[in-house]
Image: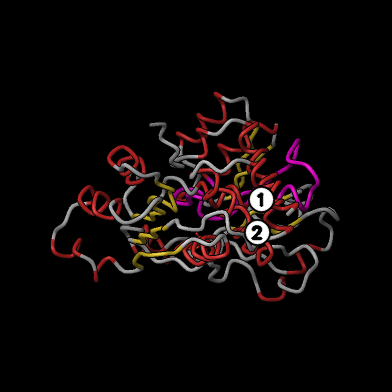
Amino acid sequence: MENRSLVTIAEHSKEKILYLLEMAKEFEKCPNRHLLDQKVVATLFFEPSTRTRLSFETAANRLGARVIGFTDPKVTSSSKGETLKDTIMMVSNYADIIVMRHYLEGAARYASEVAPVPIVNAGDGANQHPSQTMLDLYSIYKTQGTLENLNIYLVGDLKYGRTVHSLLMAMRHFNPTFHFVAPRELAMPEEYKLYCKNHHIRYEEHTDFNEEVIADADILYMTRVQRERFTDLMEYERVKDIYILHAKMLEHTRPNLRILHPLPRVNEIAYDVDGNEKAYYFQQARNGLYARQAILCDVLGITLDEVKRDTEK
Ligand code: CP
């Protein structure tokens, strides 16, 4: 049987991405459906989450599915030494699809190779976060009217930030110019810069973050410095407050600029930005519901035509 898992966004063609965005648009028109009646969705979160888990669970509930799962591996038999493989095999007995977040890079790939049901990667360590990328692309498309030829500034923790790694790969289809704004300790890893070179993606690197640097930005994608990924907490203390976006910095930016953030934020976006018309991060998180409804349907083999026919009912 075809493996319909979503492990990395790099596996999706431009056509597939646009197809999923069109499906998300259908769900935004009407989120409450019966397309997944009789289905069970398992959400296995080996790492904390607010948005990803709750939006996947809301997506499943609004499509008529039932949801099982856990938010804390300490209350499961993995705390007694059960392996990831055995956990996945067990949950596959009960659910039609597994949405999994894991702290190990490659865990989703491994799970997709052993599981008899599709796996959706809800974040694996510092590696990938493909469902976040789908909602990011949907947000960019909604706010800019296009995904093509945009100036995208990625700011903050580009070393450990799985959301920026996934976004960079997905944007290869759309001729972006990236600006990587990070301190040297958190710079974009060489493998992703090589990915850019191999896919003819333009990028510039900056260590300063100020009004002049962001003057021509269409998208300002802020990220949190991820304390949980540091082995040296002294290093975290040195870089944690390095970039803070204030409303004043937006005065001379482009009118179409929108500020995205995968959230949670710590203090990299000051609260005075929240009321600015260019702040889009809370709507972005809402878009996660529609993007994840599209992902669940697609992974379970429900087509865009079926979704459209259902919209017309
Ligand atoms: N953006 C994101 O992954 O948020 P959570 O960690 O709250 O799921």
Quarter assignment of residue 247: bottom right
N-terminal-most mark, 2 or 1:
1
Q: Is mark 2 within 8 Å of ligand 1?
A: no
Expressed as whole percent of the image width and height from the top left, the position of residue 155 reads 60, 53
In terms of image quadrants, where is residue 263? bottom right
Q: Amino acid at mark 1?
A: Ala
Element under disc 1:
helix
Q: Choose mark 2 or mark 1, whichever is in front.
A: 1
The reply to whether the C-beta atoms of the residues labelled 2 and 1 are less than 8 Å apart is yes
Q: Does 147 appear in magenta?
A: yes
Which label is found at residue 287?
2
User: Where residue 311 sits in the image (x, y, percent)?
Assistant: 72, 53
Mark 1 burial class by Cα count in 10 Å: few <14, some 14-19, many 20+: many
Q: Which residues are magenta?
A: 136-164
Q: From mark 2 to mark 1, how far is it between C-alphas? A: 8 Å
* Residue occupying the point 66% across, 58% down: 260
The quadrant in which residue 172 appears is top right
Relative to 148, residue 70 above or below? below
Location of the C terminus by quadrant is bottom right
User: Within 10 Å of the Cα at label 2, are there few (<14), some (14-19), or many (20+) other Cα atoms?
Assistant: many
**Which residue is the site of mark 1?**
24
Secondary structure, mark 2, is helix
> Which three-letter amino acid code belongs to the residue tagged 2?
Asn
Q: Is residue 249 left or right of residue 153?
A: right
Q: Please name whichever residue, 99 or 308, is drawn nearer the observer in this view of the structure.
A: 308
Is residue 276 located in the magenta-colored stretch of the structure? no
The extreme front residue here reads 313
Residue drawn where x is 80% and y is 66% of the image: 277
